[in-house]
Image: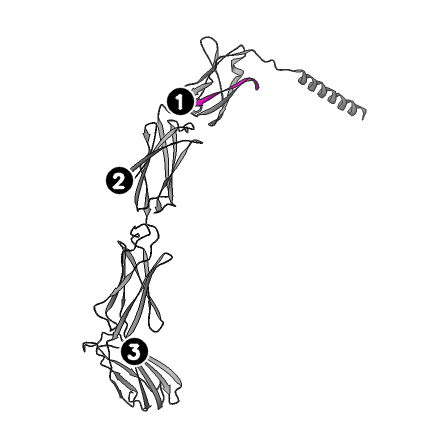
Amino acid sequence: MDGKILYILAFILLGCSNKKEEQTTSFTKPAVEIISNTTNSIAGEAISLVFKTEADVNTIKLYIKNAFGSTFLSPTISESENIVFHIPKNYTRIAGPCKWKLLLEGHNIQEGKFDVATNAPKATYIESYFGPRSVTAGYNDYSMLTIAPTDAFDNPLDDGTKITVKYQFQENIDETEIETESFFAFYNVRSTLKSGRILVTAECNGTTSKELATIVYPDNATDFTISGTSAHNYADGNQIITFTSDIIKDKYGNIVTNGTLVTFVIKTDKDAYLYTIGTTINGIAEAKTLHPDEAANWEIQAFVTGAAESNTTNFTFNAAIKDYPVHFSKGNRNLDIGPFESFMKQLIPDGLLTQLDIYDANGTYIDTKKTTSKNGVCTIFLGEHFLEDGDYILKLTAAGITKEFRKNIHGDTVK
């Protein structure tokens, strides 16, 4: 047990002795003289730092750091026995401060920095952005031109660099001068009162940007007028009526954009609503719909949703069919309706709706049958499977004309 204790004490004393020896070891800073010290440079120029020292060259390193990054450099020996550090091109092309430290065996023996300025005289490049690429006519909208001029090594030019902005609309060409701030410049190009295209470009140190453009679209439509035309005003369910607007413009007199949607709303004399739509071409919208199949009076008004509305115009349709015959057969189960003759005694086009409402003798509604005309006539058959024998009230409606019959329905000759 005593032997182990002595061994541990001896180990502790040996460790303390070594630590004390390490603490007494000191670094002696060698004499260093900087022979060539570059403090200011232009991007792209070669930079070398030259030092005179008696220290071991193999143990000296130069640590440099700038916006590109950081690295360690090894020296070369000049003819005069000085040590030379050549700064790599990647570091000399980046504008801004570059800090350096001369290290010997990991110890900093000297430090400094040099500044790299932008190289505008060599070449200037312009990055330009313009948007939005479409604006609305008037005083409130604009597109922003942003310009970022750089030198040949992509360094932003110094604040205060002058840039000339030119913009053209129709016959007018204007220009203005702005300056960079925080490495870029911007200019707001206001929209015009007239629709069209605005072209913009920028110039800096004799270098021009690419041509950029924004389109000035018309503002919202203003109220307009409409009219309705047709080959005749008979309610034949066949002819087409055309609704046409005048030239729709904005408040500055610009014709609205082609394709502007216009909705024509039709109110009938039965308080029903129909609608048809059209889109503008050269500011004029057209929409079409069929004539009704019975006499009617329409009120028509058009809307550009959320922007404008038209006047209200009326169109009256006269009855094309004055009357029609109805023939019962086969125990009053078969109804032959027609022929339907139009305003010139011609047969109506196929497709006229005919509706038969069936009631019992007490007027209680039972059912409805519908059909459409073909070759000017239509037929409705009430089979035994559909309607039992008995007395019924039949109300027949076609072309807005209603006829009522009281019939005893019996038998069914169809087998």
Left or right: 66, with 369 as reference point = right
Q: Amino acid type of disc 3?
A: Gly
- Determine whether the residue tagged by mark 3 lies in a helix, strand or loop: loop
Q: Which mark is residue 44?
A: 1
Q: What residue would you read off at disc 2? A: 171
Q: Amino acid type of disc 1?
A: Gly
- Determine whether the residue tagged by mark 2 lies in a helix, strand or loop: loop
Above or below, 287 against 218 in this view is below
Above or below, 297 against 78 in this view is below
Reading the chain from its start, which is encountered first: label 1 or label 3? Answer: 1
- Determine whether the residue tagged by mark 1 lies in a helix, strand or loop: loop
Q: What residue would you read off at disc 3? A: 400
Magenta-tinted stretch: 104-120
Residue at 34% from the left image edge and 50% from the top image edge = 219
Q: CA distance from mark 2 to mark 1?
A: 44 Å
**From the image, which quarter does the C terminus lie in?**
bottom left
Is 227 in front, or is 62? Answer: 227
